Amino acid sequence: MSKGYFSFVLHGHLPYVLSHGRWPHGTDWLSEAAAETYLPILRILEELIEEGYQPKITIGLSPVLCEQLADNSFKEEFIGYLNQKIQAAQQDAEEFSKYSQTSMLENAHFWEKFYRESLEHFNDIGHDILFEFKKLQDGGYVEIITCGATHGYYPLLSRDESLQAQTKMAVKNYRRHFGRDPRGIWLPECAYRPRYEWTPPVPIAGKQEPYLRKGVDEFLAENYLDFFIVDSALLKGGKSIGVYIDRFEALKLLWGQFEKQYKPRKEDKDKTPREVYMVSSSPEGKKPTAIFTRDAETGLLVWSGEHGYPGDGNYLDFHKKRFPGGHRYWEVTSSGADLADKMEYNRQNAVNRIPENARHFSDKVAETLVAYHDSTEQKGILVAPYDAELFGHWWFEGPMFLKQVLKNICEDDRVELTSLGDHLDRSKSTSVISIPEGSWGEGNHHYIWLNQQNEWTWKHIYESEARMCEFARFWTDNPDKQDAELETILKQMARELMLMSASDWQFLISTFAARDYAELRLSEHYEDFKSLAAAAEKKIKGEALGDGDRKFLEDCQTRDKLFDDVEIEWFAKVEFPA
């Protein structure tokens, strides 16, 4: 008899980059993630199944990521990317051979083999990564959950119509790609806000007056989403542990500005991440939504580049790359080592570290669950949520670690692997609680996504939200004015607004990871939205569009072509008003 349950939860997401640059920021991000994370995760899951294991992991695939992986332009781009990486490895090998650099030559051969096998894998699955994940879900091996449509930061969006659109688009998109309804959602940045009289943090049209907002949980319940994931400090208080701060020096500096204002809530020792709770902030008696809580201790073992397994000196270093090909030939060496001090990567030494790290992690999981069972006589759950891209992209050996941990857990009588949906059915939780507003950043609040550096982005978003809702109300209130061209314009405006609202832009600005690109992208979507709005106004006034207007609309549709089935009505009115 097992003593408890364990669930890996991997959140796959990238912002929309198709037709928006290639390198250093753009489609290469998507190609890197596909080669280093999505294909390797598929591979290790398929290997586990062939070896007789039931992986039972929960995988989040954001709608905007699904749209990109399904796009033929990505598939063509990815094949070209893989061939370019193969060629770059061959060129590196020629140089290393010329200068008798033996270990570097071995690594160049490794990279050539890695990308050749990736290309073969991609060809074998018919260039359809999403369908492979669908097959794993249909076979009962994994559970796929959704996310806000474009990863909009729910607590800071100014209109309930926006939250409604992000959620409804997510459900509709999931149904189209996976042939069923999603049960769970990874809220973007794990950010939650209950119902209350909300004051916009950035004035809207010069005003900053409070108004009643629905809780995020209400939108989930209305769209039949059964559960979401929160950080442990949102459940029980205490000091929060940031998951990004070790990786971005800019975040450490930013946190220093906010740390003095941060006062952790007193810890509630009656609540535990081992249990499932129901959350509701609605006074109308709506069905509550379940929450699963991140386990902070095991989270740090993997998240932290300084204290966690990825900081092991033998693993491949993420930052140091050889140009022009961009391959990596150096090991971490030590978490504090400068790039100039990195040692050459030894693949076998890195592989040899996996069993020990995986055993330490799986034993920690088992010990935690056994201790909880011994003290309560209950079978608890330990939830370990991570960005999927951590495994393979950030931590190259991560998929091997993931596979070994899953094997260890499957072979451990003390622990049972479970998906979150299966455990929710098993737990039959009836305990309804309230949780505060917050995210999974350091300090559990919004400072990463709202600070002096990115406050301007919210002014653009709030202005555009209000205009989108005005146009959508006109559309629904005036059926006699509806025609195909106006519908096309309004749907493209909705796409531009949703892309503008992605939380990625504020994060990249705050971390300085790709600040110029993020600022440019948000500004471009804002300008495109305004130009489309001007065309919509012409139509409403009965004026004919010029050739330039139509060409601009066509270009926007070609450049930002996700979510064919977006609905204008979502922005016209809230289905169940506060």
Image (spheres, rainbow, N blue to C red):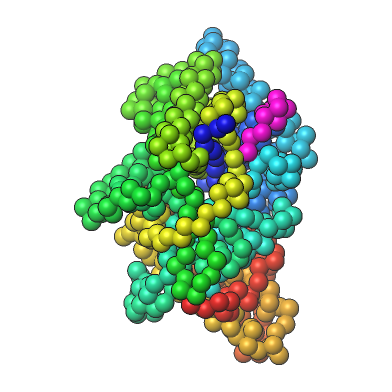
Rendering coords of residue 239 (x, y %)? 30, 47
Rendering coords of residue 573 (x, y %)? 57, 79
Nearest the viewer among 34 and 22 is 34
Q: Is residue 418 above or below residue 236?
A: above
Q: What stretch is highlighted in magenta?
A: 47-56
Q: Is residue 130 visible?
A: yes
Rendering coords of residue 436 (x, y %)? 37, 60
Nearest the viewer among 387 and 16 is 387
| Res 484 → quadrant | bottom right
Q: Is residue 493 above or below residue 109?
A: below
| Res 575 → quadrant | bottom right
Q: Is residue 210 left or right of residue 327?
A: left
Is 51 one of the magenta-colored residues?
yes
The extreme front residue here reads: 377
Rendering coords of residue 226 (x, y %)? 58, 58
User: Which residue is found at the position 42% from the left and 40% from the top?
Assistant: 376
Which quadrant, please, contains the N terminus?
Answer: top right
Q: Is residue 228 visible?
A: no
Is 131 one of the magenta-colored residues?
no
User: Which residue is found at the position 53% from the left and 70% from the top?
Assistant: 286
